[in-house]
Image (cartoon, rainbow, N blue to C red):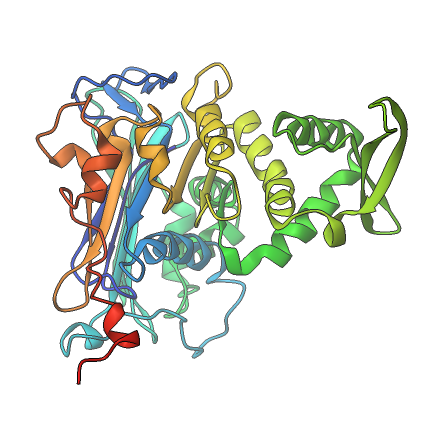
Amino acid sequence: MVLEFCATNYLSIKEELKLSFIATPLKESCSEPNDLFPLEDTGISLVRSAVVYGANASGKSNVLKSFGFYKRFITESFKNSQAGEAIDVENFRLNSTTVKEPTIMEATFTDGEFIYRYGFEVDSQSVHEEWLYKRACKKRAKEVEVFYREGEATTVHPKSTLIQELVNKKMVRSNALLISTAAQFNEPTSVSILQWLNDTKVVFCSEDEQLWSNAIRHLDNEPLRKRIIDFAKYADLGIENITKIDNRIVSDHKQYDDEGREVNNVSFAFNGNESEGTIKYFSLAYPIIDALDNGKRIVIDELDSKLHPLLVKRIVALFNDAKTNPRGAQLLFTAHDTFLLSAGLFRRDQIWFTQKNSFGATELFSLAEYKVRSTSPFERDYLLGKYGATPIIGDMRKIFNPSK
């Protein structure tokens, strides 16, 4: 599970931005089940979901993109690049200083046995710094430095012999991460971290085609196909069955006579006849089921796009409830639909806002930072601008009725 994620100097993010899943000691009242996930023997409890609100162009998606880059660079820096190739990182370009400085990212997460804190500094040419610390999941456990890399120098814990061997033999390219390299040589800690990251899915609207292809592939698993059909029925989409015929998805619907009696089933080409919302819901079915079954993480940009608010509410509720989410799966998403703020779904420490300052830099803050009651009307107060993170809209009428 994710404890915290930090990013500095990436896209619209200038100063350090921190997103935390660590529950605050605030007393909260939610009408829907909202169970914290306690990390045994640590004194830490985690929230199971978090939502980010903000105006258009405030940087909501960039918060998720930073996490996406963190995952992608760690899992791919060794195998998807060659010596001398540029790193596809983009820093904050609206400042003459940061445009010359590296991007910094760090995440704290746990696999249940250990809590890891791993991060790096990187620009388009090379890795400047890289560090990994870990401690046992116990309240007073001491954090141990596994390695710290700075330029050409790397210090390694005496017990991490394979990592030390890779460093001694200069096996790590300047544009690749040590942890990514070590995982290719089956170093246990590095393999564990990369597996954790591979079990974290990041979904953007621009990847609808990829998400659809993945959904089709999982229909070959008959038990899973039946669960996806049940998931569709749960959403009241009118779908009775979903099958794959010659790599085409077909949905079955009931046909009725004029007296309302069921007389037949009618088949439709799923991608051509179903609504965009139904297609999106179907595409997300497997990632959601997989995350809840196996305690994985799923990050979704604009979860509420094309989906009814009540349906989004039920999806979030699946993650918040320990009965449907016993393994501690986590959901992080951006949204515009403020209905969710008044739906009794979230604690204050699950609600985050982005806004840009006067210099074009994204700032991220939690509702838990405000002195408001847990029973306050979050939706109304947000739309009234009490928390910021809303657009400042000019008088559009002037465009259609210009002054003389």
Q: Nearer the viewer, residue 8 or 342?
A: 342
Query: Where residue 287 sits: x, y (%)?
Result: 58, 39
Q: Furthest residue to the right?
A: 263
Q: Nearer the viewer, residue 83 or 239?
A: 239
241 relative to 259, above or below: below
Query: Where residue 334 sits: x, y (%)?
Result: 37, 46
Q: Nearer the viewer, residue 1 or 401?
A: 401
35 relative to 314, above or below: above
Q: Residue at x 19, y 64 (%)?
A: 361
181 relative to 374, above or below: below
Q: Furthest residue to the bottom?
A: 404
In this picture, residue 256 sits left or right of residue 135:
right
Q: Residue at x 42, y 32 (%)?
A: 330
Q: Is residue 296 visible?
A: yes
The quadrant of the picture occupied by the C terminus is bottom left
In this picture, residue 271 sits left or right of residue 203:
right
The quadrant of the picture occupied by the N terminus is top left
Q: For the image shown, how many numbered marks are present on the structure?
A: 0
Q: Residue 112 is drawn in which quadrant?
A: top left
In this picture, residue 398 sits left or right of residue 38:
left
Query: Where residue 235 sits: x, y (%)?
Result: 61, 30
Query: Where residue 59 sits: x, y (%)?
Result: 29, 58
Q: Is residue 118 visible?
A: no
Q: Furthest residue to the left?
A: 371
In this picture, residue 350 sits left or right of residue 373:
right
Q: Residue at x 67, y 32 (%)?
A: 232
254 relative to 44, above or below: below
Q: Residue at x 32, y 18 (%)?
A: 38
